[in-house]
Image (spheres, rainbow, N blue to C red):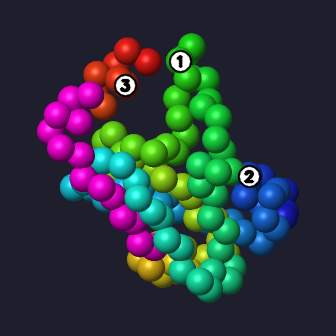
Amino acid sequence: MTRSEPPFFSAALFPGFRHVMFVTAPADVLGRIKSVTLPEKMEGVVYIGRESCPRPIRLFEKEIEVFAGEEITFPGQPLGLLVGESPEILEKIQNEISIEVLKAEETDLKKLVYYRRIK
């Protein structure tokens, strides 16, 4: 790293990995996450998900989950991060990730929304 380059979080944990891309929930589905399946070969890429960051962060005196837990409560909710050497590799891996969701019924969605408000 030269003096003109800013320090990157990913560079500190994964030397040479300078790019980050969100893995998000499908835009058209809310419900319970059944599985997130990563490709078998992910050379040059690291996945950081809820298992790596299980605790909420504190923001403006409120605790906020970094990644979705068992439920997807809004379209595009972050599920994890891909960290890698190039944006092209990250995009290729992102396109190979399979996300299975058990769709929530409307009554379940009302419970989810209510639960999130009172938390």
Position of 20 with respect to 1 (left or right) is left
Q: Nearer the viewer, mark 2 or mark 3?
A: 3
Position of 73 with respect to 10 (left or right) is left
Q: Which residue is mark 2?
A: 9
> Of marks 1 and 2, which one's residue comes earlier in the chain?
2
Residue at image position (45%, 73%) is 97
Residue range (magenta): 97-111
Under mark 1, the amino acid is Lys
Residue at image position (33%, 40%) is 73
Q: Nearer the viewer, mark 3 or mark 1?
A: 3
Q: Which residue is mark 1?
A: 62
Mark 3 burial class by Cα count in 10 Å: few <14, some 14-19, many 20+: few
How far apart in space, not on screen, are marks 1 and 2 (Cα)? 24 Å
Q: Which residue is mark 3?
A: 116
Which label sits on residue 102? Answer: none
> Of marks 2 and 3, which one's residue comes earlier in the chain?
2
Residue 107 horizontal/vertical position (percent): 17, 34
